[in-house]
Amino acid sequence: MSKKPIIIGIESSCDETAVAIIREKNDGRAEILSNIISSQVDVHKEFGGVVPELAARSHIEKIDVIAKKALEKSGIQLKDIDAVAATAGPGLIVCLSVGLNFGKAISASIGKPFIAINHLEGHALSPKLNSDIDYPYLLLLISGGHSQYLLVQGLGKYKRLGTTIDDALGEAFDKTAKLLGIEFPGGPQIEVLAKKGDPNKFKLPLPIINKGGCNLSFAGLKTAVLKIAKNIKNENDKYNLAASFQKTIEKIIYKKSKVALDQYKKIIGNKSNKFVIAGGVAANKNIRSILTKLCEEENFDAIFPPIEFCGDNAAMIAIAGLEKYKLNQFSELDFSAKPRWALDESAVFLKGAGVKL
């Protein structure tokens, strides 16, 4: 029996330093041998958000230790690695450069192929960490920096169907949390507070809900939350605003996902009925629930990565690396970090005031 490939994945695009090692199993799926993540929450908490220079410094201090831990846990020696996959973008360039250069150094030292990975493609392929999913499928990628619907036709083959024209969904959650006095990173806490409140207490806008196809907008919603938050005088109203915000997001995502499913069906027909929801916000249980319900109504399979693989991690970078390794899609060692790197590079840029939908 031939040796199954072993891939080391490295992630440092923002404020998580992560290294993972995976091995292909006999059935073609991935076995996660280790997945070590070091969060920088304590580093950035006092600033209310990620400070790029501090994040990069933390990556530099920790990445060697994290890599050693990943190797120790996996039981794999560096010489047995078949390829090195590292995030090359999009992200904060000072942070990307740390993991990217670390990966290149390992690749050069052991004489094994280097594979530059698009961070978003890592999210797009993250369901492959626990399921055997074939192409094509519809993808909703929702995170702190991105919110978009994509038709995934194969490795590296993406067609954008819709995107946010202003803020990402994860950013809207984080900003709302900050307005409610929740310390960074507060986005995930919105769902917790929402359980204590009345979702009908505050009427919030549903931006571009009936136009723009499956494009999204959250800036107007964020502004409405700001105006209400200024007049909150007690804890109950804090819970009520969190609940109203969560409910409004659910309405938007449900409606826009229904539009995206219709667009997807017009392109693909009945070939495939898979809807993948990935990215950090895919960990929101209420969003999982309403999209599962929508898929039941539309006769689609709702597919989510395990919650531990929704946020930034290196296992998703390794699985993207494994997919590319099997197709001999390697990168040169002079591959540069890309702070902007769209999955569908042919898609028109849609962002900013005056965008016509």
Image (cartoon, rainbow, N blue to C red):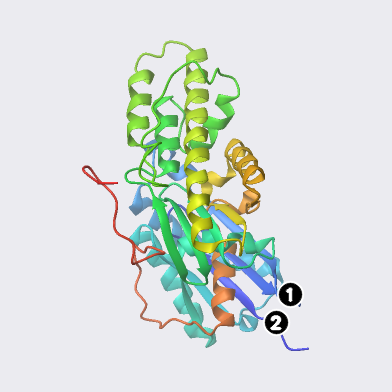
Ranked by sequence position, the earlier of labels 1 and 2 is: 2
Q: Nearer the viewer, residue 318 or 349?
A: 349
Residue 255 percent coordinates (x, y): 49, 39
In the rendered image, residue 100, in percent from the top left (x then y), is placed at 43, 70
Residue at the extreme top of the image, as rendered: 233
Q: For the point 48% across and 46% down, which residue is it?
A: 259
Label 2 crowd (10 A; few <14 / some 14-19 / many >=20)? few
Q: Residue at x 38, y 61 (%)?
A: 90
Question: Considering the numbered disc 2 on the image, is that residue within a helix, a strand or a loop?
Answer: loop
Which residue is more in the foreground, 305 or 264?
A: 264
Circle 1: element type? loop
- Per the image, the residue denoted by label 2 is 4
Point out residue 82 in the picture as x, y percentages from the top left corner. Answer: 60, 82
Q: Amino acid at mark 1?
A: Lys
Residue 330 visible to the viewer: yes
Q: Residues within 10 Å of mark 1 (few under 14, many from 20)?
A: some
Residue in the image at 55% along x and 54% along y: 38
Residue of label 1: 25
* Front-most of residues 338 and 224: 224
Looking at the rendered structure, which numbered label has been put on residue 72? none
In this view, 231 is above or below 301:
above
Residues tagged 1 and 2 counted as in contact (Cβ below 8 A): yes
Q: Is residue 18 visible?
A: no
In the image, taking residue 139 as reference, residue 168 lies left or right, namely: left
Residue 130, by quadrant, is bottom right
Residue flagged by tag 2: what amino acid is it?
Answer: Lys
* Quadrant location of the N terminus in the rendered image: bottom right
Mark-to-mark CA distance, 1 and 2: 7 Å
How many labels sit on residues? Answer: 2
